[in-house]
Image (cartoon, helix red, strand yellow):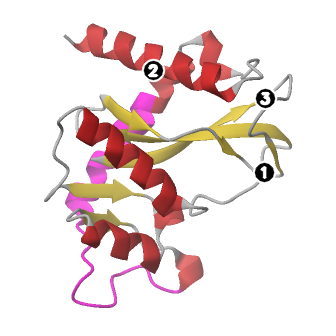
Amino acid sequence: MQLDRSHTPVKRGGMQVGYQGRKKTKTSNLLFLTDNRGLPLACSNVIAEQHNDAYKLEAYMIQILSQLKNANLNHRGLFLNADAGFDTESFKTYCREQEIIPNIYGNPRNGNIEPQNHESIYDRLLYKCRYVIERTNAWFDAFKTLLVRFETNDKHWRSWHFIAFIIILLRKV
């Protein structure tokens, strides 16, 4: 499984909007989970962008895992690839509690690029598969409705993403 966030500029304001200094605009984002072929499996609720990747990460993962459970998809024993923005001890602990094996690149800001204890692993070869979620984010950018957020209601904007999930799945079948 692959985990990443998608940052989207917001033009008309609305719910869950925050200023992102790096992009110099107001943005919203969603947390996506894909399989190893890049098919989107689940996404979080809309997140205001003034926060970093690790903000309320466990709460958003509860939402994502409940979507997997509702779809009768088992997450136990699977590897989860995520970039350095998700490198927090609390998130790794949460993953282990959910029987997910975290394969997270170490964040240099934390001072640890390689795992420090025997409970953490980092497999470089497995991590190379993370490009599939970047490709999925590029697929989302092909939908003009998702490229820039004009929706003021976050439920509507999230629903557009679910429609994109279906279209991406149909293109792969």
Disc number lying in front (1 or 2): 2
Visible residue check, residue 110: yes
**Res 149 quadrant in image:** top right
Left/right of residue 35 with respect to residue 77 in the rendered view: right
Q: Quadrant of residue 145?
A: top right
Query: What residue is shown with label 1?
Result: 22
Dot 2 amino acid type: Phe
Name the residue that disc number 3 marks: 10
User: Label 1: few (<14), some or many (≥20) within 10 Å?
Assistant: few
**Which callout, 2 or 3, points at the residue further toward the start of the chain?**
3
Residue 79: x percent and y percent? 21, 57
Query: What whole-number distance in Å separates the C-alpha atoms at marks 3 and 1?
Result: 14 Å
Q: Is residue 109 left or right of residue 131?
A: right
Viewer-nearest residue: 87 or 125? 87
* Residue 55 at x, y percent in the picture: 61, 62
Looking at the rendering, the stretch of residues picked out in magenta corresponds to 111-136
